[in-house]
Amino acid sequence: MKISSAILFAFKNLRRRKLRTVLTTFAILIGTTLISSMVSLGVGLQQIVVKGLKDTGELTDINVYQKEDGNRLLDSETISKLESLPDVARVDPMVTLMADEVSLSGFEKKVGKTLVTAVPSGATDVFKLIAGSPASSLAGESAVIGENFLKDFSNDYPERFLGKSLNLTFGQKNLVLKIVGVARGENILGYGVFIPLTQASEIKKMVTYDSLRVKANSVQKVAGISKEIKGMGLEAVALDDLVDRVTKYFRILELALGSVGIIILGVASLGIINTMIMATLERTREIGVMRAVGASRRDILKIFSLEASAIGFIGGFFGVLCGWGITVILSSLLNNYIAAQNIVQTQVDLFALPWWLIGSIIVFATLVGLLSGLYPAIRASRMDPVEALRGE
């Protein structure tokens, strides 16, 4: 029997017992709906976090920190040793400060605790400008402010803030700097202020630095440089390593989120077994007639296996559709809430249902149906044609 004929015959048999087929398929549908909606949540969160990590820097960047129990300090001597390593293009020391109060000229409002990041004048690739000139950024008494930080004062165009005076208060000390740029608010740095490292020295005596940013000549050299830095007794975190770690953690989260749906599919497989065994008993004479007119055991096995697979496929297909519908509704409600609260200006894609996930869920549901129907199919194929013809 041709596979196309077997498929048509299998669907015809399923239509003959509509209620039983629908009830069995519904259990598969619930399981795949939960899997698609829950796993899409994990995939969506993963994409948001990975994108946020990639927005914080380049793949050639290595962030270096002092180990809690380490003796190696992040000082000028360490910087010199790092700069001497092969394939290191540049080493940028960075200092993090916390301003007690921040104000802008022309605005009465003052903002409290604000993150201030001090970087060398040449390290302008730490941020991405949406207003201002990179050539004039962080030179002398200048500052670059984050896009999201501006929203605490006004929703005007970023260009309107250029040239204004920025007053930073650190206890009893004040810094008055000129705003020369606005950084894109893609990550947590978008809520803060960037100042030249020379200006930070007036607030904090910098014998050591909070972190170092090592710039490799190419992405291929990052792993080797990271290994050498760790050998010096320092903590090295490369962006690609961090992305890999986050991806592994989210794989575990996705499995945990989809486990409930997998359990339901396991229960649904028992329903498929029961349905197919009942079908075998009810169609005993039919099987006998098919064997009598020339159908082989392989043909009977093929028909019953396809019927079980069809139940899994239909349940998986409509389950993915339902899961997609749930994610669309939840995403819409979430973005409406975010817009009403004015939390962020862009839409948040909390759920992600890529094609590979859709295909994997449907294939998995079909496989569950096939494996569940395998025993009843084998049982049907082994029936003796003479005994089957005698059955009622």
Image: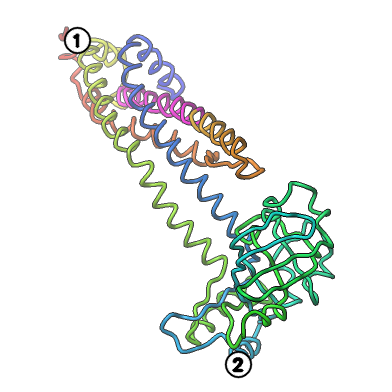
Check if residue 320 falls in the magenta segment.
yes
Left or right: 94 as drawn, with respect to 286 = right
Q: Residue 367, located in which quarter of the rendered image?
A: top left
Of residues 324 and 97, the one nearer the viewer is 97
Checking the image for residue 77, the label placed there is 2
| Residue range of the region highlighted in magenta in the rendering | 299-325
Q: Residues within 10 Å of mark 1 (few under 14, many from 20)?
A: some
Residue sitting at x 60%, y 44%: 343
Instruction: Name the residue nearer the viewer: 251 or 76.
Output: 76
The C terminus - image quarter: top left
Residue 292, image x and y in percent?
Answer: 26, 13
Q: Of helix, strand and loop, which mostly describes the magenta segment?
A: helix
Q: Image height check: is 255 above or below 32?
A: below
Residue at 72%, 78% in the rendered image: 199
Q: Against 334, is 226 above or below?
A: below
Instruction: Specify the amino acid type for callout 1.
Output: Leu
Q: Give the CA separation, mark 1 to mark 2.
A: 93 Å
Residue of label 1: 389
Indicate how the structure is coloured in the image: rainbow
